Amino acid sequence: MLRKHIKIALILLLFAVPFLIYGIYLNSTRVHLLSRGNYFFDLTRNRADIEQIALVFPNQKSIHIEKKDNFWRIKEANNYYTAFSKINALVALIRNTVIYRADNFHSKEEALFQNALKIISTDASGKIVDEATIAPLKEGNKYYYALRNNDGFIYQLAGNFDLSSHVMDWVQMPLFTFNINHVKRIKADNFEVYRRFENENFKDVQTSTEYTHLQKLLDNFWYLTADEIQQISQIDLSAFSKVNHFDITLFNGIIYQIDLYTQNQTYWITVKLNREGLINKTSLQQIKENSLLFDGWIFKINHDKGINLAEFIL
């Protein structure tokens, strides 16, 4: 009798196993089909109250992009403004990254994520909305492997997660975009030159002597970027020595008032925007928008350029 029951059980098991395997296959296929084409950061992209996006890199560096006063700022750069192009690209990446494939995650796949990037979004209350782990793109692979919110799946993503871990790559730069063709007048502590038209040589205000080598000076401002940024309110400016001042007036009427400081063989600048006479609405708007990037900030600049600006003479 017992043997009969065992035989029946074995027969039932033989019938059940194929159905079980087929069910697992269907479930796996269903997960794949349901996930493919869906947005990976779906929780983040559907929230209007995201206040922080943290990028945690395998080299132990972190970049926290935080929304303050309706502006995105970089915490590690003393809350200076995030580069418009960078935040737009990051938001687009988060909004548009789609899932190519989803499979059950197995412990043997943990090695894929040894040097992974983490992207963590947080809402206004400080609660994590999405926590994603993105593995480095392997040579020959078209898709990134990723984990999300400990949901038990490993994803393949279409996107570009080659993000910089250098903080200053994320701030709004350069400080200046004007070149010699834009400049009408330059006033420094030890000289003042001007011209009426951009194709003319600069002339000394006092002697009308013409100068042709102002390009060397202006090259130091052309697309100048900061190596470090501090809030003036958080430093002792009296510990810095002021070594030069420049008023650079552009043909559009905008004046850049630049003070050059030195401290312990480093060079720093502060910038204020002003205007001369009547200027058009576009220039006025430019002053208004760009003043936010200068008012209350001091910028550490390249050492060699700092020396050139400090020692420049006609």
Image (cartoon, helix red, strand yellow):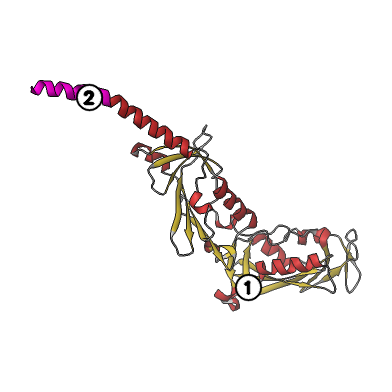
Which mark's residue is nearer the viewer, 1 or 2? 2
Question: Which SS does the magenta portion mostly show?
Answer: helix
User: How many angstroms separate mark 1 from mark 2 (CA)?
Assistant: 79 Å
Where residue 185 appears, x then y in whole percent? 83, 68
Quadrant that contains the N terminus: top left
Where residue 42 appears, x then y in whole percent? 50, 49
Q: Which residue is mark 2?
A: 12
Q: Crowdedness of circle 2 by 10 Å Cα count: few (<14), some, many (20+)?
A: few
Q: Nearer the viewer, residue 25 or 204?
A: 25
**What residue is rendered at 8% in x and 23% in y?**
2
Where residue 212 appears, x then y in whole percent? 86, 60
| Stretch of the chain drawn in magenta | 1-16
Type of amino acid under label 1: Gly
**What residue is rendered at 63% in x and 73% in y?**
296
Q: Which residue is mark 1?
A: 296
Image check: 199 left or right of 3?
Answer: right
Q: Nearer the viewer, residue 313 or 9?
A: 9
